[in-house]
Structure formats: structure tokens, C-alpha cells
Amino acid sequence: MNESDIAALTQRVLWASFGLALVFGVVAQRSRFCTMGAVADVMNMGDWSRARMWGLAIAVAILGFNGMVAAGWVEARNSIYAAPRLLWLSAAVGGLMFGFGMVLASGCGSRNLVRLGGGNLKAGVVLLVLGLSGFITMRGLTAVLRVNTLDTVFLELPRGQDLPTLLSVPLGLAPPVLAAILGGVLAVLLLVWVLWRAEGRTAEVWLGGVGIGAVVVAVWWVSGRLGYVAEDPSTLEPAFLATNSRRMESLSMVAPVAFALDWLMFFSDKAKVLTLGIVSMVGITLGALGASLAERSFRWEGFGKVEDLSNHLVGAVLMGVGGVTAMGCTVGQGLSGVATLSLGSFIALAAIVGGGVLGLRYQMWRLERMA
């Protein structure tokens, strides 16, 4: 494969990722898929519909990814989620920050991309601040603090932190076999929970759960299968095309927003190129825009008062810093990461939910105090 072939394949990866992101945006807009909204519905109204939608999306992502591992198409170790070094404290603290921040900012990164497509200018401000604070946490002031504090606390595992790899030697089974078993069992358990109540059997729940989960799996395939090159002619090493991490990737909503801002600000620098993450951010927003126009729900919305602005700014900073520290958001860790059965992803997901609960309780406390 020569350089022109690599360039052509890179374009295919980018267009495929963009198309899948469009689907994500349409489905998220039509189904009201939102992690923060799911937690809020449970706490405020006892409504588990969107929580079951989220559980269904996780089940589909786990089943699809581990099915590909069992088939030999992809390997979890080729992602950022399955390294032997388990940064458990970073995942926990970053997840708590992100979860609390998404409540203040009226939604996580994916929800704000969808809201932006629906005409919400507040979401645009949130995304700008999220991207800036995320980039600073990758390479700036808070990056130094992160690396010198939280990232110094870790567990060095004998193998990758994805469960099929970690348990392969003790159980005497190959990782692909364990991926099929563990992925299948977890997916079935989640599916049973989703179907247990009538609220989990509605068309909206299945549209959002199956649609979002399937898109996450499809992007894993695009990155890890379609975009994999056994020998890059430039480096003579294996490569995953059009990814910022140089590993296979699926959807995530914090670092890609930061990389999108970096690409826009330094566009004249030829070293700055489009990646799967960047085009996905655009695709999700445009997909949501198209869906909102089609259903005639598009409307401009801005900040009503200073307190509203301040809450969103603080929430955006917490999401940017927390999302990078935890190596992902509700989609990056909660769907893409959990699909790999990574221990760090499970820790981050639990912390994000915990942070969301704390954020909602904080808001309730403030409302009661004001009353």
C-alpha cells in the first residue's frame, strides 16, 4: 500500500465516521438520548425510560464490540482503554467532576452538540469552554497538575485492564473466547433489565438504545478494521488512520471538541489534519440540526440571566477537565470504553453517575434554600 492508497483510505474513514455521526445526531435528537436527563428523570420523577435506553445502548455496544473481538476483527489492547496501567484515581475523580459539571451545563458533551444543532446557543458556549479547558488539561496548566497528582496513583496490572485479557490466564481461556462469553452475558443481563418493565419496551427507548449503541460499534469497526493498516509506508509500522490517539477509537465528546478547536485555530499549520473525532463532532451537530428542522423543533435559545451563564461556564470547565482526566465522558467511557470491558471505564462510568447524582442534589438544595 503506497501513500496515495493511504490518503484514499483515510478519506473513506473520515467520510464513514462523518456519516455515522450524522446518524448519531438524528437518533439522539429524535429519542432525547441524554445521560444527565436519564439520571434526572429517575431522581426527580421516578421515570426509568431514558435510563433503560442508556442501558440498552451499553448492551448493544458491549455485544457488538466483543463480537468483533471474538471474530478476530479488533483487539481491545489497540484502544486507549485497555492499557495495563489502571489510573483508577484519575478515572474516579475525573468522572465525579464530569458528572457534576454535566448537571450544571444542562447535559454532557454529546447532549450539548445535539442541543447546538437544535438552535441552543448556550450549548455553543458550553462546547467552546469545554474544548478549551479540555485542551488545557491535555497539554497545559491543568495537564501538569493532573500528571503530577492524580496520574501518579495507579495499579500496574500484569496484562491489559480489559476483562477478557486480564482473566485469560487465570481462567485458561483465550481473550477472544472470554470476550464472547463475558460480552454476551453482560449484554443479556442488561437486555433483561431493559425489558423487565413496560417503559423499556417503547419505540423511543429502542430507537435511542439500539441506534446509539450500533453507531458506537460501527465507529469501532471503521477505526479498528477499515482504518487499520498493517504497515504504514511512512513508518513501516501498523497504523490506525485518522485518529488523534494513533490507536483505534470510537465516539467520545471531550478531547475531540478540543482537537476541533485546535484544528480551527491552527488551520494554516499543515500538521493539523482532520481526524475521526473532529468530523464526528460536526456530524452529530448537523444530524441534530436536520432532525430538529424536520420535526419543526428548531428554535434559538440563549442565556436568561447571569446565574444561568455562570452555572453553564462552571459546568463546562468541570466537564472539560474531568473528561480528559477520566479519559472520556458519558459516551467516551460510558459507551465506547465500557464496550471494551475495561476496568477503568467501569470506574469512570460509576463516578460520572455519582457526580450527576451529587450535582442534582446540589441543585435541589439551592432551590430549597432560595424558596
Image (spheres, rainbow, N blue to C red):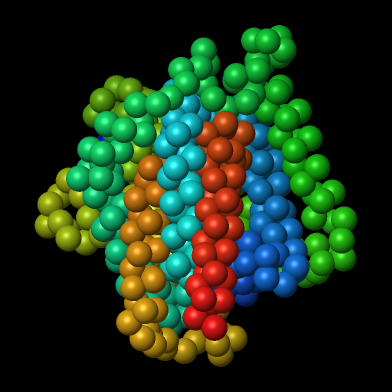
Residue 250, image x, y percentages: 49, 46
Q: Quadrant of the N terminus?
A: top left
Query: In the rendered image, is residue 216 in sight?
Result: no
Q: Split into 4 quadrants, where in the image is the C terminus?
A: bottom right
245 or 12, which is in the foreground? 245
Left or right: 274 as drawn, with respect to 28? left
Is residue 323 shown above or below 295?
above
Q: Nearer the viewer, residue 156 or 191?
A: 156
Q: Going 51% across and 12% down the picture, which residue do you hit?
A: 158
Expressed as whole percent of the image width and height from the top left, the position of residue 109 reads 45, 61
Quick check: 102 left or right of 273? right
Q: Is residue 319 above or below residue 179?
A: below
Of residues 302 and 272, which is closer to you in this image? 302
Q: Residue at x 56, y 38 (%)?
A: 347
Q: Is residue 170 left or right of residue 262?
A: right
Residue 147 is situated, as x and y percent measured from the top left of the image, at 29, 33
Q: Nearer the viewer, residue 311 or 108?
A: 311
Residue at image x 80%, y 55%?
A: 194
Q: Is residue 125 at least partly visible in the picture?
A: yes
Counting from the top left corner in percent of width and height, residue 65 is at: 62, 39
Residue located at (71% from left, 22% from top): 177
